[in-house]
Amino acid sequence: MMLLLRPYTDENGHVDDALIDSLKPEERETLLAWVKTYIHESTYINHNRSSYSLKHCFENDTGIYVTNNQFKDAMIECGFFPVDPDELNWRYRISERWLKNRNWKQNSRKQ
């Protein structure tokens, strides 16, 4: 669900209201850069990836843990809105091709 145009989850008594503002600045920058690099708009709904699976892709690539809600917030900040904001794990109109070919560890500027 969305609350004031930001993601908010209250599922089975568990509230996830964390937003990307609560991340360390370098983690926030990395998350936004990852989304901008690998998430590309499509006319079709991607049924293979949800916000939850995408957050795990991000964590596997970077080693940075984010909540599902923080990932949803990053997607909104980058201009990607959910097909149905009432779903727990949001689906988007995004391309699968870029996600399959991601190579963050070798392309990142980490030292």
Image (cartoon, rainbow, N blue to C red):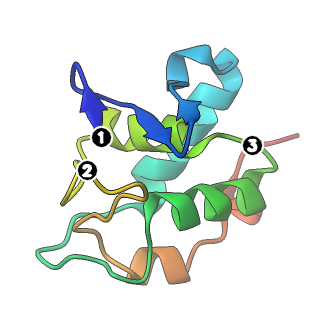
Mark 2 sits on what residue?
Answer: 86
> Residue at the front extreme?
13
- What kind of residue is marked 3? Tyr
Snapshot quadrant of residue 111: top right
Question: Callout 2, which amino acid?
Answer: Asp
Q: Quadrant of residue 73?
A: top left
Left or right: where 17 falls relative to 30:
left
Residue 35 in the image, given as x and y percentages of width and height: 46, 50
**What element does badge 1 sit on?**
loop
| Label located before the other in sequence (2 or 3) | 3
Q: Secondary structure at mark 3?
A: loop
Crowd class of label 1 (few under 14; some 14 to 19; many from 20; radius 10 Å): some
* Label 2 crowd bin: few (<14), some (14–19), many (20+), radius 10 Å: few
* Along the line of sight, the residue nearer the viewer: 42 or 82: 82
Residue at (44% x, 74% y) in the render? 49
Which is more toward the observer, 18 or 33?
18
Indicate left or right for 74 with 92 as reference: right
Residue 40 image point, x, y percent: 30, 64
* Image mark for residue 69: none
| Residue 80 position within the rendered picture, expressed as x and y whole percent measured from the top left | 25, 49
Residue to which mark 3 is pinned:
65
Report how far apart the C-alphas of labels 1 and 3 lie in the structure.
21 Å
The residue positioned 32% from the left and 57% from the top of the image is 87
Q: Are there few (<14), some (14-19), or many (20+) residues within 10 Å of tag 3? A: some
Answer whether residue 23 is visible to the viewer in this image: yes
Residue displayed at 46% across by 36% down: 10
Q: Is residue 32 visible?
A: no
- Judging from the image, what secondary structure is the residue with disc 2 in? loop
- Contact flag, marks 2 and 1 (Cβ < 8 Å): yes
| Residue 100 appears left or right of 88 | right
Considering only vertical position in the picture, is 76 above or below 23? below
Find disc 1 in the rendering and name its residue.
1
